[in-house]
Amino acid sequence: MILGNSVMHKTRNLLYKTKRIIKIIFFSNTYKIIRKPSDIFPIYYHIKDNTWEDLYISEVFEINKESVIKCLHESQDIIELNNVIISPYSNILITDKGVVWDKSEGSNFSKIIPLDSNLASYNSQQIKVFKNKETKEINDVCIFLGGVHSTIWSHFLVEYLPKLYYACDSGLFDKPIKVLIPKYNDPHIRKIVCDYISLFPNASLLELDNKYDYKCKRLFHIPIASQASDHADYCLPIDFLLPKNVVNRLKNHLMQYLIPDNHFCEKIYLARRGTYRSMSNWQEAEDYFVSLGFKIVKPHEMTLEEKITTFYNAKIIVGPYSAAFTNLLFCNKSKVLIFSPLMRAYETYYKTIGQLSELNILNVTGTDNSSDIHTSFFVPIEKIKQAYFKLLNG
């Protein structure tokens, strides 16, 4: 039976690979990757010069102290593109001169695994792109908020939401403009976008259907605001490069949703229960912190106002590694303990996004189940207790 399953698995893999090769040969087009789009297309607005940005590596219990490294975040411009083809869940922009692909400009491009929905294959010079069966035309002047992970809370905040701020700074909202968005399942993302667009009478939203490609007669391309990997086999500190001006704009703008009410728990536990990329002894850890008076919090079940206010008022935050810690952006002088797989303990994302919140973050690791960045893991409860004592008294 085991041998039969193995044969079936190999057969399925072979069929998948064969179908993909056929699809690439007959249903994809090859394009040149444009390395410096600002050298080729008209610059509408200069966003920023080159800046050296601080990336914060949190302390890992009994392994390393907190440290800071400086990384280059390159200059950015809004460029004007004509007759450009886009796909809702891809960062690939197809022009008559080649492909504009923001991530190809990133310092970590050689190690990432891009997840663009229409990507067939690529190398450092060119790219093969699948095409949908039908392309719809958009004749309005527009900007595009879609792309890989553009509907995921953490990526949306640091990569895509700042595009609206840049559009405002540049004056794009002073004249009629269409804001192209993917389908948002997260109500918080939808609320933030809709609330912001409502401030500008000349701006309107158009939700894109993933079944189609779209040809935009005139699109002002606003680059991704931060560098955040789609996927990778291993981690580097530069996988998340968040400029300080982005963090500052996010915090200042989103704190408008803060509820003027202090009746929120000062000790919260961010639950992640036995799911993909989880801590195997999560129940043990959860029970321990509940016994210390922590409130179990599930940010995805809160309103946007509740989420922001909960984190703003929390003084101690603990829990297994998860995207919920993105909400450290809204904190105010908090102490944070993250139970992490060793593979992810040196990410700069959470400490950097909380750089304006005066956070004291401590990671505590145990044993990873694999060398995959999405590995599950185990952290002994006694080690968690020791790390928590250090967090409170260190």
Image (cartoon, rainbow, N blue to C red):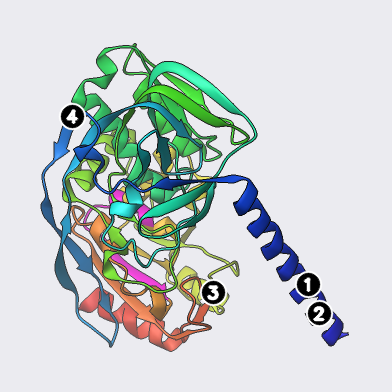
Tell me the distance, in whole angstroms, between the alpha carbons under discs 1 and 4.
Answer: 53 Å
Per the image, the residue denoted by label 2 is 7
Per the rendered image, the range of residues in magenta is 326-340
Q: Nearer the viewer, mark 2 or mark 3?
A: 2
Inspect the image, locate mark 4, and give the three-letter code of the amino acid beneath it.
Tyr
Q: Residues within 10 Å of mark 1 (few under 14, many from 20)?
A: few
Tell me the distance, in whole angstroms, between the alpha carbons under discs 1 and 3.
Answer: 37 Å
Q: At 31% across and 71% down in the image, what residue appears?
A: 236
Quadrant of the rendered structure where residue 47 is?
A: top left
Above or below, 213 relative to 178? below
Contact, mark 3 vs mark 4 (Cβ under 8 Å) = no
Residue 144, percent from left and from top:
40, 31
Above or below, 7 relative to 215? below
Per the image, the residue denoted by label 4 is 45
Inspect the image, locate mark 1, and give the three-letter code of the amino acid beneath it.
Thr
Residue 265, percent from left and from top:
38, 54
Per the image, the residue denoted by label 3 is 282
Quadrant of the rendered structure where residue 351 is?
A: bottom left
Point out the residue furthest to the right here: 1
Left or right of 369? Residue 54 is: left
Point out which mark residue 11 bears: 1
Which sits earlier in the primary sequence, circle 1 or circle 3? 1
- Is label 2 in a helix, a strand or a loop? helix
Q: Residues within 10 Å of mark 2 (few under 14, many from 20)?
A: few
Residue 179, percent from left and from top:
40, 24
